[in-house]
Each structure stands twice: as C-alpha cells, then as structure tokens.
Amino acid sequence: MEKDIVVLRYGHRIVRDYRVTSHCCLVARAFGAKKVEIVGDKDQKIIDTVNDINKRWGNGAEAEFVDNWRPRISYYKNKGYKVVHLTMYGISVQDAEKTLENDKKILVVIGSQKVEPEVYEKADYNVSVTTQPHSEIAALAVFLDRMFKGNELTKKFSGAEVEIEPNPKGKTIHESRKNK
C-alpha cells in the first residue's frame, strides 16, 4: 500500500539544530517521506542542502519552513492524516505499526526543543521507538522503515545524476553525463 507521509520538524533553532534538522530531512527523504515541514528559526541553508541532494541524487522529499505547528497539525488532520508524534513516552513502535497498517496518510511530528504538552494531546498517537533517550533521527528512520516495511530501502529516485551500485569491496558510483 502506497503511503503519503509528511514529517513536521518541531522547534528548529539556528546554530544548535542545523546538522540534526538537515539529517532529519535526509532521512525523511531517503526513507520515503513525501515532504518535510520545519517549524522554527528559518534557515535557508537547510532548504539549499535538500534541494542540492534532490538535484544530484534524484527527486525526493522537499523541505520548507512553516510558521506554526498548530495550524499545520489541524491542516493535516482535516485532510485525513493520522498525526503520529515520535517520543520516548508513547505506545511502542511495534503496536503503532499494527495500528497504522491501513492508514495511507500520516503526519509524523519530531521535536527538537522541549515539546509542549499540547503536541501530545493533538497527536492521534504518541509513538515510542524505545523508552530510552535517543535521537529523533534514529526514531524517524526506524518508524519510516516500519511504515514502508523495508520497501523504501530499494527505492529508485527519478532524475538522479548520481547513483550508487552496491559493492562488497569498494565504491561503485555512476554519474550522469551532465556532471562530467
């Protein structure tokens, strides 16, 4: 079943979160999300990074900054999305996987700064990848892998200028002619 998954990155702070938010975008893209919306300090470098990756490695999730998480959650709920907040305190990802199996549209909320209690309340599901402290990047990767049942791991990205060929002993890189 094709899933439409959007990631909402909550609370981005320039300087402190640049690499983590960029990596959240890269993981969302590589693991099959359609889009990443970022709430917080606007940072054009993140958008430029994602655009460059999409140009070179193929069309994947785009990223954009949005002003406020509340209207975004309401917007997606009104469009029929289930809202999943990744946290240490929710139901297990194994239970969420079973519960969300037939849902085609999911908004995944991942925090940066301390998440307001209202996020927990507005989420349809608060989902825990583990009950130990961990990275939102890892939680996002595990959650997306569960939602796509591993099929995202072999996804081909259209328009790629660069492609990697699996190689057990080295690096095999194919670049399109326009890069040479």
Image (cartoon, helix red, strand yellow):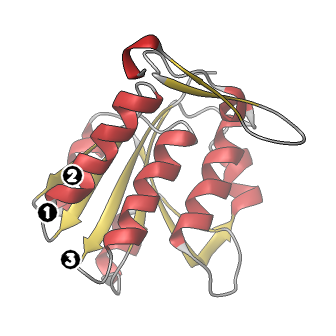
Residue appearing at x 26%, y 72% in the figure: 12
* 120 over 78 or under it: above or below: below
In space, the residues marked 3 and 2 are separated at their CA atoms by 21 Å
In space, the residues marked 3 and 1 are separated at their CA atoms by 16 Å
Residue type pointed to by label 2: Arg
Dot 3: what SS? loop
Residue appearing at x 71%, y 75% in the figure: 130
Depth check: give the residue in front, 16 or 167.
Answer: 167
Left or right: where 112 falls relative to 91: left
Dot 2: what SS? helix
Which residue reaches farthest right? 168
Which residue reaches farthest front? 180
Disc 2 to disc 1: CB gap under 8 Å: yes
Residue located beneath label 1 in the image: 68
Depth check: give the residue in front, 104 or 129.
Answer: 129
Disc 3 to disc 2: CB gap under 8 Å: no
Q: Quick one: label 3 or label 2, which is nearer the N terminus?
A: 3
Dot 1: what SS? loop
Q: Which mark is residue 14?
A: 3
Residue 127 screen position, x and y as percent: 59, 66
Examine the rendering and report whether any part of residue 62 can be seen.
Answer: no
Residue type pointed to by label 1: Asn
Residue located beneath label 2 in the image: 72
Left or right: where 76 falls relative to 166: left
